[in-house]
Image (cartoon, helix red, strand yellow):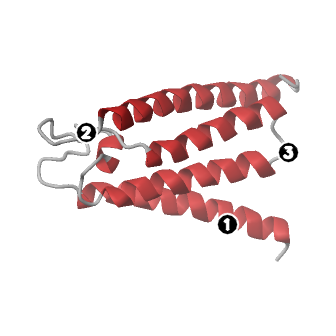
């Protein structure tokens, strides 16, 4: 197997493992958590038992996107930078947890604020990256 194929297999492995962790994370949540009513960030929230699994999913997904952005040559540099920014923000979202869904539970407000900031930047970076990839495919330009 070629090195390129092994690299691709490793990146796919990161994505699959991240998806599995994020899909299973609600099973570790305390009573009262609803995967319909609560966010994925709340399954990785401060002080929540089992939050490690959702945080691991965030990390693995971030590293998968970062590896994709660094190794692909089909995207423009701007698209790769946008996706790398998304990835770094995803990794930071794992490091800075949101407040728990239980409004009476203690939490660190500054960490919740940092989580919100990186989550917002992550969404913007992803949207910009997707538009840049789509624009290049549609027009063949270097946006």
Q: Residues within 10 Å of mark 3 (few under 14, many from 20)?
A: few
Q: Label 3, on which residue? A: 73
Q: Give the residue at x 24% y 40%.
A: 107
In front: 45, or 137? 45
Q: Label 2, on which residue? A: 38
Q: Is residue 14 above or below residue 111?
A: below
Q: Quadrant of residue 56?
A: bottom left
Q: Give the residue at x 36% y 59%.
A: 52
Mark 2 secondary-structure assignment:
loop
Q: Residues within 10 Å of mark 2 (few under 14, many from 20)?
A: some
Work out whether residue 76 can be spotted.
no
Label 2, label 1: how far apart the Cα atoms are? 31 Å
Number of labels in the image equals 3
Label 3, label 1: how far apart the Cα atoms are? 17 Å
**Disc 3 vs disc 1: Cβ atoms closer than 8 Å?**
no
Q: Label 1, on which residue? A: 10
Q: Quadrant of residue 129?
A: top right
Work out whether residue 129 can be spotted.
yes
């Amino acid at each position: 197997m070629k090195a390129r194929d092994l690299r691709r297999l490793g990146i796919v492995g990161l994505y699959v493992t991240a998806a599995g962790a994020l899909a299973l994370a609600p099973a570790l949540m305390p009573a009262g958590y609803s995967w319909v009513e609560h966010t994925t960030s709340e399954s990785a929230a401060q002080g929540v038992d089992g939050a490690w699994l959702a945080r691991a999913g965030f990390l693995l997904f971030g590293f998968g996107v970062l590896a994709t952005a660094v190794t692909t040559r089909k995207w423009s540099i701007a698209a790769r930078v946008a996706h790398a920014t998304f990835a770094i923000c995803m990794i930071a979202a794992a490091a800075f947890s949101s407040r728990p869904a239980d409004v009476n539970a203690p939490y660190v407000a500054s960490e919740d604020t940092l989580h919100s900031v990186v989550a917002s930047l992550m969404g913007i970076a992803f949207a910009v990256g997707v538009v840049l990839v789509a624009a290049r495919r549609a027009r063949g330009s270097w946006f």
